[in-house]
Image (cartoon, grey):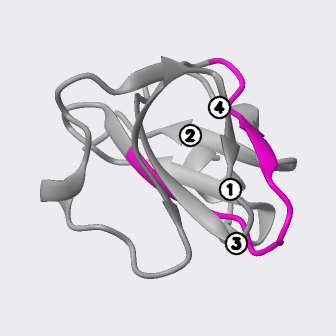
Amino acid sequence: MSQLKIYQKEQNSVIFNHSDGIAEIYVNNNNAANHPFHLDGHVFAVMFVGEKGQFPDESEYNKRNPIVRDTVTIPGNGFLVIRFIADNPAPTQRMFNSIIVNEIRNDSQ
């Protein structure tokens, strides 16, 4: 059975089909308190951190010198935009903001 059939949306699976291997994720914090965000197994570039409001246009991203971390704080009622290289060759569980998701790399496309 294909790994892509095993990991379904109901299981918090995230399938990356990017030919360049770059994943971009928007992370919301719907709580008034600041909250740590950690991504197991990868470091990520923080492209934007915002408080309330609309997500930014890509032209507003910090592409010149984004911080690179595996943990960052999301402001209360805020959000962040991260990018990382989704280069893990095997399905693994990842911790996204205290929620376990399955990360699956799809090399078949």
Query: How would you rate the neighbour count of disc 1 (Cα within 10 Å): few for under 14, some for 14-19, many for 20 or more?
Result: many
Q: Earlier in the sequence, mark 4 or mark 3?
A: 3
* Measured Cα–Cα span from mark 1 to mark 2: 28 Å
Query: How would you rate the neighbour count of disc 3 (Cα within 10 Å): few for under 14, some for 14-19, many for 20 or more?
Result: some
Numbered tag placed on residue 75 in the rendering: 1
Q: Earlier in the sequence, mark 2 or mark 3?
A: 3
* Measured Cα–Cα span from mark 1 to mark 3: 6 Å
1 or 4: mark nearer the eye: 1
Circle 2: residue type = Ile
- The residue singled out by tag 3 in the image is 77
| Residue at image coords 38%, 42% | 23
| Residue at image coords 69%, 54% | 7
The secondary element bearing badge 4 is classed as loop
Q: Nearer the viewer, residue 99 or 16?
A: 99
* Measured Cα–Cα span from mark 2 to mark 3: 29 Å
The secondary element bearing badge 1 is classed as loop
Circle 1: residue type = Pro
- The residue singled out by tag 4 in the image is 91
